[in-house]
Image (spheres, helix red, strand yellow):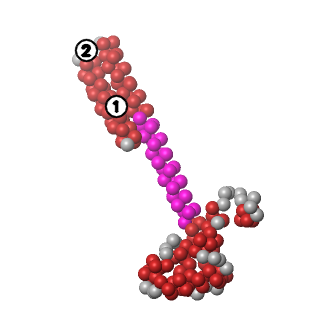
């Protein structure tokens, strides 16, 4: 909205400047003394100043939008890199636990927040099968359930900068 208003102001001041320039030129050619045109010349100069100020504001606004866009792109790329790294780390941990492909899928869907019933519908299996595979994931991982599974992977992501999981585990 501010950029649109600034653009409108630049155009308005431009129109005023052009009209004043035409008026002053016509009147000077008609023989009107320059002293009588001084008020209109001041208006003309003020209009030019308004154009310059608003053009500068518009340029600054565009530069700021460009910076924000670049920051957003950079953040998005960093987030993608982190998510990809997290996915690799999760996959490695599943390898360490020796999870089967079905157990991996169950664990990933649980990490995404799906309930057993939703996982069963998605995988076109019974809820009982999903429950059994989830129990197998917990047994192989040494975790006590869905909450522990999520906490296992998310705990280090939620630590304040500069802290390690060792510090948190010791209760400090």
Q: Is residue 24 left or right of residue 80?
A: left
Q: CA distance from mark 1 to mark 2?
A: 27 Å
60 and 44: which is toward the camera = 60
Q: Nearer the viewer, mark 1 or mark 2?
A: 1
Please say whether residue 14 is visible from this viewpoint: no
Above/below status of 38 relative to 4: above
Q: Position of residue 8 (x, y in %)?
A: 33, 37
Judged from the image, the secondary structure of the residue bearing numbered disc 2 is: loop
| Residue 10 shown left or right of residue 119 in the figure | left
Image-quadrant location for residue 89:
bottom right
Pointer 2: residues within 10 angstroms few (<14), some, or many (20+)? few
On the image, which quarter does residue 167 sit in?
Answer: bottom right
* Residue shown at 66% from the left, 57% from the top: 160
Residue at horizontal 55%, vertical 85%?
133
How crowded is the residue under tag 1: few (<14 C-alpha within 10 Å), some, or many (20+)?
A: many
x and y percentages locating residue 64 in the rendered image: 49, 45
Residue 41 lies in magenta, yes or no? no
Tell me which secondary structure the magenta stretch mostly adopts: helix
Residue at which label 1 appears: 13
The magenta region covers: 54-80
Q: Element type at marker 1?
A: helix
- For label 2, the residue is 31
Chain-order first, disc 1 or disc 2: 1
Check the picture and name the quadrant holding the N terminus: top left
């Amino acid at each position: 909205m501010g950029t649109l208003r600034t653009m409108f102001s630049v155009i308005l001041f431009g129109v005023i400047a052009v009209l004043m320039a035409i008026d002053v030129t016509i009147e000077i050619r008609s023989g009107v003394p320059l002293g009588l045109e001084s008020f209109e010349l001041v208006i003309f100069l003020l209009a030019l100043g308004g154009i310059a100020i608003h053009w500068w504001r518009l340029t600054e606004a565009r530069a700021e939008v460009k910076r924000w866009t670049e920051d957003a792109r950079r953040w998005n790329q960093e987030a993608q890199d982190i998510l990809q790294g997290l996915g690799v780390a999760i996959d490695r941990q599943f390898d360490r636990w020796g999870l089967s492909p079905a157990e991996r899928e169950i664990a990933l869907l649980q990490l995404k927040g799906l309930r057993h019933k939703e996982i069963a519908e998605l995988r076109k299996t019974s809820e009982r099968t999903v429950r059994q595979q989830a129990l197998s994931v917990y047994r192989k991982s040494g975790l006590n359930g869905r909450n522990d599974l999520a906490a296992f992977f998310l705990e280090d992501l939620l630590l304040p900068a500069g802290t390690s999981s060792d510090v948190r585990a010791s209760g400090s």
